[in-house]
Every structure is written in C-alpha cells, then in structure tokens.
Image (cartoon, rainbow, N blue to C red):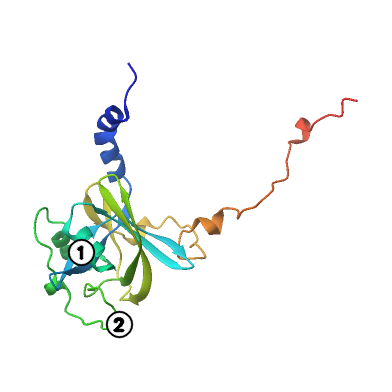
Amino acid sequence: MTETMEDIDEKVGDSFRVAMSRLAAGVVMVTCHVDGQPWGLTVSACCSVSMEPPLILASLGANTVSAKAITDHGTFGISVLGEQLVHAARFGSSPGEPKFMQHLCAEEHPECDSPAVSGAVAHIDCVVEQRIVAGDHVLFIGRVCNALLGDADSPLVYHGRTYHQLVPSTDLGVSPVADETIDSLLYDYPLPRRFARVYPTDDRPRDRR
C-alpha cells in the first residue's frame, strides 16, 4: 500500500522535531503592537534573506496573536537577544501567556515603529515585504527600515530545547568570514556560468580515430 503524504508527515513528525532541536540557533524576540501596546514573541526561526535590498525573515505560527497583528499593521521588529536577556527570552516563550512587554522596553527609540527590547544586541525595524503561508506557519519577509546596534553582549543560543551561552573555549580557531552574513551569493557561482570540463590525467577522452 502506497504511503500518503499525511502518513509520512505523521511518521516523521517526532523525529523531525528532535532533529531541529539539534540545530543551534540564535534567539530573537519578534515585536509588534497589540491593542496599542508592545508585544514580543520569542522565536529561533529567523534569518537574513538579502542584503540588496536588506530583507529578513521570521517564521510565526499562523494562528498566533503576533501573526495577526503583523498582518494587520504591516510592521514588525526583531530584537536579537544576548545572554543577559534570557529572562526576556523565557517571558516571550511562555506557552499560552499574554506577551505584553512594556517592562522590557524601558528605552525609547523614536526612529523605530516597532518596540525594541532594552539591552538587545541589535534591533531591526521592518515593514512587511511578503507574507507567505507555509504549513501551519506564516513566513514574514521584512524590508529593513532601521537597524539599532546595542552593546556587544555574548549571544543567547537555543539548542536541545534550552538556552545556552557561548564561551571562549567554544571557538574552533577558524578565521572569521569576511562578510558578517552567511550569504550564498558569497560562496556559490552567479548565473549564467559555464564550467570547464576537468578530467583526471588518466581519464581524458581518447581520440579513437
């Protein structure tokens, strides 16, 4: 009997969840306004998309207050959290609890429309460029309007379903990447591109005439 996609989804669901828990990721709070008040949800599914123009992506559950507010207002922010803000990360990830975050936004940033977490490593202010429904989530691609840089705190990392900090001993001694963004344009070949056919010395085509 041929398996359906629904059968496959059910079979791989638990192992996929565990597999993704093994992918270490930075921690951010996606911020917006709900009923005129600052609101922030902790997520790890966030990445840069493009530098020209500057675009960033955040993935949110489709049936969440955050997703509805961002859809309605067309703006959102991303506060990158450092290890000193683990309390903010835990607040923004409390299941089923309201995420009004006035107490986390002591600083005023009039140049940003979105709420910014005080003490964040960085805060990125965005307008929605694209909204893409993907399964039970919505991918919000934001056009960056402003980027505020905070103190160079050590990043907060999420791995194995808990929070971690980086320490100097974790440095593998690899030289820094020239560009701060891991962008495929830096490492892959642009199109169009033709590759010379390269043969090992003993495997070159022979003239059989």
Q: Is residue 133 left or right of residue 108?
A: right
- Image x and y of residue 13, in percent: 26, 35
Quadrant where the C terminus lies? top right
The amino acid beneath tag 1 is Ala
Q: CA distance from mark 1 to mark 2?
A: 20 Å
Rendering coords of residue 190 (x, y %):
60, 55
Specify whether 185 is left or right of 39: right
Q: How many marks?
A: 2
- Picture layout, residue 98 above or below residue 196: below
Q: Residue furthest right?
A: 209
Q: Residue 44: percent from the left, percent from the top?
A: 28, 55
The answer to whether 17 appears left or right of 196 in the picture is: left
Q: Nearer the viewer, residue 45 or 154?
A: 45
Q: Which label belongs to residue 69?
A: 1
Residue occupied by mark 2: 111
Q: Residues within 10 Å of mark 1 (few under 14, many from 20)?
A: some
Q: Image quadrant of residue 101?
A: bottom left
Q: Residue furthest top?
A: 1
Counting other residues with Cα less than 10 Å from the Cα at mark 2, is it few (<14), some (14-19), or many (20 or more)? few
Residue 26 lies, in percent from the top left, at 31, 58
Q: Residue at x 12, y 56 (%)?
A: 94
Q: Secondary structure at mark 1?
A: helix
Which one is nearer the viewer's eye here, 73 or 92?
73
